Image (cartoon, coloured by chain):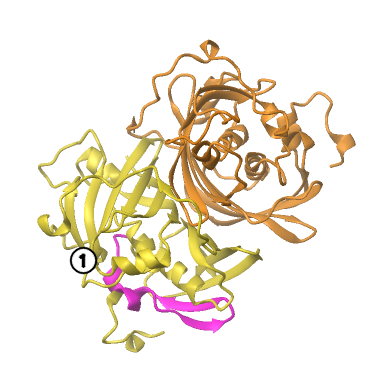
Chain colours: A yellow, B orange
Amino acid sequence: MTEAARSAEAHPFDDAVALKPVAEGVYNGRTHPAYANMVGPFGGITAAAIVRAVLDDARLLGDVISLTVNYAAPVADGAFEISLTPVRTNRSTQHWTVALTQDGVVTTTATVVTGIRRDTWSDAEITMPDVPPADAVPVRPMPDFVAWARNYEMRYLEGELPDADTGAQPDSTTTLWVRDQPSRPLDVPALAALCDVFYPRILRRKGTFVPAGTVSLSSYFHATAEVVRAQGDRPVLATARAGVFGAGYFDQSARLWSADGELLATSHQLVYFKG
Amino acid sequence: MTEAARSAEAHPFDDAVALKPVAEGVYNGRTHPAYANMVGPFGGITAAAIVRAVLDDARLLGDVISLTVNYAAPVADGAFEISLTPVRTNRSTQHWTVALTQDGVVTTTATVVTGIRRDTWSDAEITMPDVPPADAVPVRPMPDFVAWARNYEMRYLEGELPDADTGAQPDSTTTLWVRDQPSRPLDVPALAALCDVFYPRILRRKGTFVPAGTVSLSSYFHATAEVVRAQGDRPVLATARAGVFGAGYFDQSARLWSADGELLATSHQLVYFKG
């Protein structure tokens, strides 16, 4: 796909994850300047493109249930290829291995589990934080130099990006209402991207900029297709915090709820940081 | 490796994860009857064998930082092959893809990130639960038909395996002191296995047996080599709970602390269940 091929009407998100099939399980994509991060693209958009590829594959069985993305190296601006293999297809689950390459060199690996959801007993042990509705919370964008963040309408309830006066904080929790900007009905690729919408927790703890990048991200998708559809373009409640920092790494756990209070996804990542 | 080749002196755990290199990045192993589960081996021992393979590879850079294992199909009793590829080696991190096969058919896929730990700022946001020391808690084994569990000394603080009288429970949390049995100094393969030492959370919620199996497991290893060494053969404090159950799946998050109160690992999994 060339820049010229991008649709003038499409949402920037859909443009950014648009893929051209070139063989069975092989897709060509291209980084989108709107989703650029400090070094390479926003990790969430790479995760979303991988989910897009699996969903586009005719061999797909069921819904995306689990996704792990390993960010082995920054994706350079320009063309990339996603290749995916359904290494095992069972009666109700399917296991995929995925590689994102540029000029034949791996930048990203992933595994995806898809599966048929069935009607079973259900219960949530973790509940949505009790917060004001999205429209009662002011929109507060990230600084303008973070290109990808301009694609998200962010309404922080706690733990917004520190500024020069914030100082070190004792707790890394961030909670926000967030949706695509311009707004767009939620789907699983968009949810996969939202799982990575949090700035690095180390910034909040130190109260200053620290180079950091996700090494490995695992997201579990709990919402049925009906729940995702019912969400429409309303904001999602997203919260994340770190577990432990040390020896150059920290972990982060996140939860994303629908506007109706259903747990859409849980997501965990290990993050590299400097200093 | 044949059964006969197993060492009479070795700890059953080391026997179960013993691998024979047959080519660069290719190892032969064999399931161990002592680590059998209902269908196929204990998922933790498969994770441990994968970690063992990465640690045995001469190309290894750094420590095991992150591990994702996808249980695509049960491993049948008998021989298996683990093949691993360091798809990307950077200055301080290395990304591996792994497949476990039997007769050329994939049963398990994995990705591993290894990395050099550096001296950085450190802090724990989550703290060890305040519990009695291990020697004040009685050992309570799992039922004898769960073969693998006989390799662990389990001292439950809460949420032990339900029996016929337990009934449904409102909360899935299980917390226990646990170590290998016979005791054995902790290492990273053993820690990888311990991340999966919890019986399925759905059993506690329903108060009865429900068929369930891990689909995807991701573990983050926080402990430096010194912390792992300092642990020795003392029990680890392990706690796990579910997030949400529904449509045939639930998620579980676990934390494992050293006897000195250091967070050794955090681990998350998505689990399939029936009914």
Q: Where is mark 1, residue-wise? A: A150
Nearer-the-camera pick, A182 or A46: A182
Query: Is B50 located above or below residue B137 in the figure?
Result: below
Say whether residue A234 is visible: yes
Query: What stretch of residues is rendered in magenta?
Result: A13-39
Q: Quadrant location of the N terminus of chain A?
A: bottom left
Q: Percent x, y for residue B19?
A: 75, 42
User: Is residue A189 found left or right of B58 in the rendered image?
Assistant: left
User: Which residue sits at x=58%, y=36%?
Assistant: B199
Q: Percent x, y for residue A122?
A: 45, 51
Q: Percent x, y for residue A68?
A: 49, 56
Query: Is B91 located above or below residue B2 in the figure?
Result: below
- How many marks the image carries: the answer is 1
Q: Was residue B123 drawn as part of the magenta stretch in this picture?
A: no
Q: Percent x, y for residue A158?
A: 18, 45
Nearer-the-camera pick, A94 or A228: A228
User: Is residue A110 found left or right of A176 in the rendered image?
Assistant: right
Query: Is A173 located above or below residue A216 in the figure?
Result: above
User: Which residue sits at x=89%, y=35%?
Assistant: B4
Nearer-the-camera pick, A93 or A219: A93
Chain containing the residue with disc 1: A
User: Is residue A273 found left or right of B43 in the rendered image?
Assistant: left
Q: Quadrant location of the C terminus of chain A?
A: top left
Question: Label 1: few (<14), some or many (≥20) within 10 Å?
Answer: some
Nearer-the-camera pick, B136 or B32: B136
User: Which residue sits at x=35%, y=75%?
Assistant: A16
Q: Was residue A23 drawn as part of the magenta stretch in this picture?
A: yes
Please, what secondary structure does the residue beneath circle 1 have?
A: helix
Q: Amino acid at mark 1?
A: Arg
